[in-house]
Every structure is written in C-alpha cells, then in structure tokens.
C-alpha cells in the first residue's frame, strides 16, 4: 500500500489552499536557511478580533488555530512550489490572545498541530510551545510562527 501524497491528504480533508497572505509589516513571509524554512507569524482567515476566554471559546480558538495552519501551508506552498518538499515540521509556536483567567492555550494550539499531523503524517510530529499574550497584532485571537525542515 502506497502512502498518500500531500495533495491527496489535503483533498481528503476538503482543504483548498488559498494564496499566501502578505506580511502585515516590513518583514519577509519566510526565510530559508540551511535546510530550514522559518515562517513568520500568521493569524486566522478573516482576521477575527478578540480574546480567548472572553469573546471566543476554546473550541473557536481551535478552529482559528486550524485556519492559521492553513495560512502557514499556503506560505509553504508559495515558498517551495510543493508541500512534498517539506521533510519535517520542526516547531510550532503559538501566541494566544487570552483573558487572564484562560487556561486552555494548549487545546487551542492543537488546531494547528492536528492539521500538521493530518497533512504530513509522521513528518508532522513537531516540538511546540504556546504562550498567553496580553495583546497581539490587530487583536487577533492567535498568531502562530513555525519552522520546517525542507529539501535543499
């Protein structure tokens, strides 16, 4: 039995990648160094505004993190011309715009982590960290930056 291609996995998940979003300020969407691709912080589609634990639930945060993961995949696609050129998801780091009493940061970031595992299989298993933030750019509910090992 052959392993599914990334395109097949995306299709099975019902995901059509959008065009990569542009940086929100004066920085690069990604930087490639020594076989690693660093993707700048991305947020969810539609730019929702608000805090987890106040305007949004943990479940809504999970969906925002998943949407952000799709944005990250779009940047990878534009940088590499094919997601098949990803050798491994190395690190996912989330910044959750959260109310002071919110404690489910890890459950929110699972939206992106689960997506990476669904899309890349075992190569999607990664290190990660998540932080609660008093504020983030544009009052987005989450921002995620990421690192990937890629074909040279």
Image (cartoon, rainbow, N blue to C red):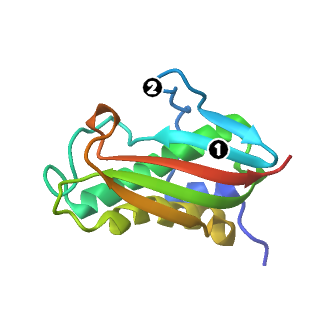
Q: Quadrant of the N terminus?
A: bottom right
Q: Describe residue 20's horizontal placement relative to residue 152 as left or right.
A: left
Q: Describe residue 52's horizontal placement relative to residue 117 as left or right.
A: left
In this view, 85 is above or below 3: above
Q: Secondary structure at mark 1?
A: strand
Percent across and percent down for residue 74 are: 58, 40
Percent across and percent down for residue 70 are: 50, 47
Residue highlighted by disc 1: 38
Residue count near mark 1 (Cα–Cα under 10 Å), binned few <14, some 14–19, many ≥20: many
Residue sitting at 83 percent across and 50 percent down? 151
Query: Which dot marks residue 24?
Result: 2
Q: Are marks 2 and 1 in contact (CB under 8 Å)?
A: no
Q: Is residue 42 visible?
A: yes
Residue sitting at 57 percent across and 50 percent down? 146
Work out which residue is located at the far bottom of the displayed protein and give it: 1
Percent across and percent down for residue 9 are: 61, 61
Residue sitting at 25 percent across and 47 percent down? 134
Percent across and percent down for residue 132 are: 31, 56
Query: Which dot marks residue 96?
Result: none
* Of the pair 26 and 67, the residue shown nearer to us: 26
Along the polypeptide, which appears first: circle 2 or circle 1? 2
């Amino acid at each position: 039995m052959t392993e599914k291609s990334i395109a097949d996995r995306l299709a099975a998940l019902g995901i059509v990648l959008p065009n990569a979003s542009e940086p929100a300020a004066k920085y690069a969407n990604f930087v490639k160094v020594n076989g690693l691709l660093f993707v700048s912080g991305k947020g969810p589609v539609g730019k929702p505004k608000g805090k987890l634990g106040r305007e949004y639930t943990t479940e809504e945060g999970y969906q925002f993190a998943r949407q952000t993961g799709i944005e990250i995949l779009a940047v990878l696609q534009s940088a590499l011309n094919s997601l098949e050129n990803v050798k491994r998801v190395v690190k996912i780091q989330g910044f959750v715009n959260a109310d002071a009493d919110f404690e489910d940061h890890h459950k929110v970031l699972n939206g992106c982590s689960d997506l990476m595992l669904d899309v890349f299989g075992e190569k999607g298993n990664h290190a990660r960290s998540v932080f609660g933030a008093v504020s983030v750019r544009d009052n987005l509910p989450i921002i995620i930056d990421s690192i990937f090992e890629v074909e040279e």
